[in-house]
Amino acid sequence: MTKIIVVAIVLLLVAGGAAVALRMRAGRDTSATLPVTAKAPGRVAIVYYSQSKVRNTALIAQWIKKHMGGDLIEIEAVEPYPEPYTLTLAAAEKERRSGQKRQIKPVPSLAAYDTVFLGSPIWYGSYAFPVEQFLKSNPLAGKIVVPFSTHGGGGAPRYERDVRAACPGAKVLAGFTARGSNQVERRLKVGVTVHHTEDDVVRWLNGLFGK
Ligand SMILES: Cc1cc2nc3c(=O)[nH]c(=O)nc-3n(C[C@H](O)[C@H](O)[C@H](O)COP(=O)(O)O)c2cc1C
């Protein structure tokens, strides 16, 4: 009997601790606390594609804009990918196999920009197909290109290398990648909205452009 009571008390303590930890994480302030010393050269554009409902890549794009200024330019598919995730995957897989990637809407001219941040969800280890379409018709030669991405746990193994290959004549800087969150994590507000904080982004920007 005493054993059962001890086990029950231990279980209650563990559950209570977990609940407190979750509440602490949920209540964590995600705003940047680090000073921003970075200033990107010239006029800045933050070009990005974000497909999923939780819009992980869009969030990183907004953080970059908050700290670097510049213009947000969203790449959009003419016909958006279907939801939920299983249908998105099926549609993307069909395009990957056939090589027939869907069209994107035209984006404004980038001629006046000196620094172009380029954001994508990671698809098949590299940029999403709409970003591939963007790169085909928008040469970035002569510009500073800064890749960023979000992924589902597999990292961004080929993204930066592929951006480099697709942007001859551009100066491609070291990128940033964050693990994206899913809808459950967003609903519970566990951790930050992606698995990195705004401070991580500031640290990266300061490393690239800080004094
Ligand atoms: C077609 C497709 C392919 C994907 N391939 C990968 C992958 O190779 N590695 C990975 O870690 N995540 C992969 N993901 C997950 C996304 O990169 C991840 O959910 C991302 O944060 C979504 O960003 P978004 O909300 O801006 O669309 C894939 C998702 C889709 C729809």
Image (tube, helix red, strand yellow):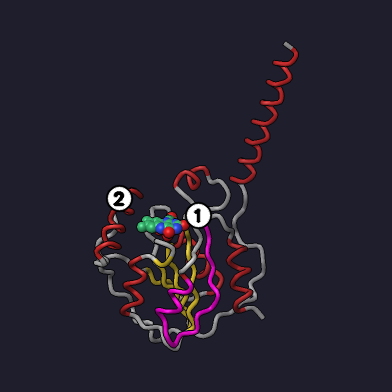
Mark 1 secondary-structure assignment: loop
Say which amino acid is labelled 2. Answer: Leu
Point out residue 33 in the picture as x, y percentages from the top left corner.
66, 62
Name the residue that disc number 2 marks. Answer: 87
Residue 87 pos. (x, y %): 30, 50
Q: Return the disc, 2 or 1, that comes first in the chain's sequence.
A: 2
Assess whether residue 131 is covered by the magenta stretch.
Answer: no
Image vertical order of residue 195 relative to residue 210, above or below: above
Q: Which residues are magenta?
A: 160-179
Q: Which mark is residue 182?
A: none
* Amino acid type at image mark 1: Gly
State the residue position of label 1.
Answer: 153
Callout 1: CB less than 8 Å from ligand 1: yes
Other residues around mark 2 within 10 Å, as few (<14) / some (14–19) / many (≥20): few
The residue depicted at 27 percent of the width and 62 percent of the height is: 97
Image quadrant of residue 38?
Answer: bottom right
Look at the numbered discs 2 and 1 and tell me whether their residues touch, using CB distance below 8 Å.
Answer: no
Which residue: 43% across, 53% down? 54
Q: Is residue 196 left or right of residue 167?
A: right
The image shows residue 119 at horizontal and vertical percentages of: 45, 68
Using the image as rendered, state which of residue 10 and residue 55 is in the foreground.
10
Ligand 1 sits in which quadrant? bottom left
Quarter of the view holding residue 135: bottom left
Question: Circle 2 sits in a helix, a strand or a loop, which is it?
Answer: helix
